């Protein structure tokens, strides 16, 4: 299983371009480092985006299983 932190900018329907998408592979990271990257991404999102989702993505495709997504913050 791989673990990712994902930040997804939610663009308004009238937007011409797609919103930003940031994915960071945290599979072998220390818990303290994971907390730090979550906080940094949250700060970035608050400053940069009107609406966004910050989520944990537990990817199990390599095990032929479904992924699990946990929303950490949304606005």
Image (cartoon, rainbow, N blue to C red):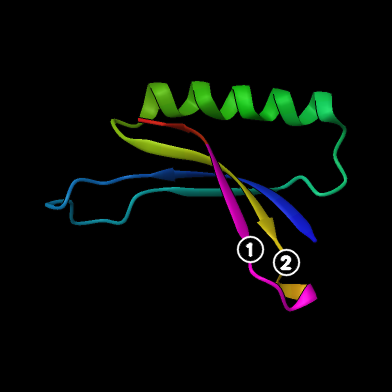
Q: What crowding class fits label 1: few (fewer than 14 Cα within 10 Å), some (14-19), or many (20 or more)?
A: some
Q: Is residue 12 left or right of residue 34?
A: left
Q: Quadrant of residue 61?
A: bottom right
Q: Position of residue 49 (x, y in %)?
A: 34, 32
Q: Is residue 13 left or right of residue 44?
A: left
Residue drawn where x is 26% and y is 56% of the image: 17
Residue that extends furthest to the left in the rendered view of this protein: 14
Q: Where is mark 1, residue-wise?
A: 67
Q: Where is mark 2, residue-wise?
A: 60
Q: Position of residue 45 (x, y in %)?
A: 44, 29
Q: Is residue 49 left or right of residue 6?
A: left
Which residues make up the magenta segment? 63-71
Q: Position of residue 23 (x, y in %)?
A: 60, 50
Residue drawn where x is 81% and y is 49% of the image: 27
The Cα–Cα distance between marks 2 and 1, rounded to whole angstroms, is 5 Å
Q: Is residue 54 above or below residue 2?
A: above
Say if mark 2 contacts mark 1, CB within 8 Å: yes
Q: Quadrant of the C terminus?
A: top left
Is residue 47 or residue 12 the one in the foreground?
Answer: 12
Between disc 2 and disc 1, whose residue precedes? 2
Q: Secondary structure at mark 1?
A: loop
């Amino acid at each position: 299983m791989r673990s990712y932190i994902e930040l997804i900018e939610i663009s308004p329907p009238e937007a011409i371009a797609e919103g930003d998408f940031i994915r960071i592979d945290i599979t072998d990271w220390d818990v303290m480092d994971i907390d730090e990257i979550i906080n940094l991404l949250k700060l970035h999102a608050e400053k940069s985006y009107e609406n966004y989702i910050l989520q944990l993505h537990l990817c199990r495709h390599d095990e032929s299983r479904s992924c699990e997504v946990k929303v950490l913050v949304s606005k």
